[in-house]
Image (tube, grey):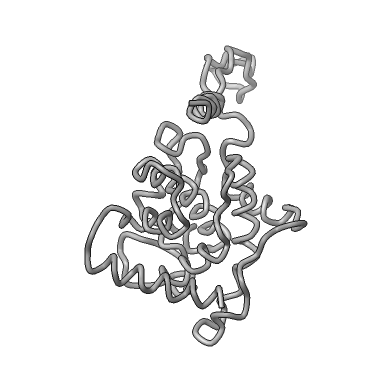
Amino acid sequence: MTKRKLKRDTRATSTTMVREHPLAVRVSKKNPTGKTIRDRHIRRLPGTDLDKNQILEVAEKYSRKSLIYPSSRKLLDKYKNSDEYDDLIAVWIDYFSKKFGVKQPLDPDSVKALIASESGFQEDPKGNKIAIGITQITKKTLKILLDSKGEAKEFIFREIRQKDLKNPEIAIPLAVRWLYRKQETARSKLGRQPSDEETILEYKGWLKGKSVLKEKGLRNYREHYEALKK
């Protein structure tokens, strides 16, 4: 009961009402004084969203002290650039685990295995018309992550375009944020804390489904995850 109440309170404080106030504008016939009155409006509070420039700034300035990194040098025989994104994975898992106060942060190896299984670490893989970039975020998911009134409204992104998902520095934080959202929805479906693998299945849309694609995708993910854990 306490956890659910705290979650509602957190979401309720993601926005605030800005009162009516004067606003400087360009001098014109309509506004000869260069002043107008801005109506009351909703504004998101700092720390509840990020735009593209802020994403890059967070990654650049984030403290690397005590970060937990994915296993390195375990997938190099298959993907020459497989260790290139370890720092981004570590930073954004830590960032969002602290942002949401989660008791069980994502395993960095599970995120790295997800990327391997989704794109083979290709920044712009071809062949999928609905998913984009290294983390294969769908157009539908991107829309949710930008929606201040949607299911991820407690923390959203601003001014991110589909083409931005071809940049791992943008795609990875969006994917990690979405994984934490999928951890929540998986918990609701299962009635318990999901494993990392179950969270990955929810990310892929396969947690409750049964299909050939699910078995093939899960096998692909497990092969990479097990290789990272050797």
The residue lying furthest to the bottom in this view is 77
Query: x, y (%) of residue 75?
Result: 54, 80
Q: Please identify the quarter of the rendering in which residue 220 is found.
A: bottom left
**Quarter in which the C terminus is drawn:** bottom right
Q: Nearer the viewer, residue 67 or 63?
A: 67
Query: x, y (%) of residue 31?
Result: 57, 16
Position of 23 with respect to 168 (left or right) is right
Q: Which residue: 57% across, 49% down?
A: 104
Query: x, y (%) of residue 161?
Result: 45, 52
Position of 9 relative to 107 (above/below): above
Q: Which residue: 39% across, 47% down?
A: 186
Q: Nearer the viewer, residue 86 or 206?
A: 206
Position of 51 relative to 115 (above/below): above
Q: Nearer the viewer, residue 93 or 50?
A: 93
Q: Nearer the viewer, residue 142 or 86?
A: 86
Position of 210 with respect to 133 (left or right) is left
Q: Please identify the quarter of the rendering in which residue 131 is found.
A: bottom left
Q: Which residue: 51% across, 62% down?
A: 111
Query: x, y (%) of residue 79?
Result: 51, 81
The residue lying furthest to the left in this view is 211
Position of 119 with respect to 26 (left or right) is left
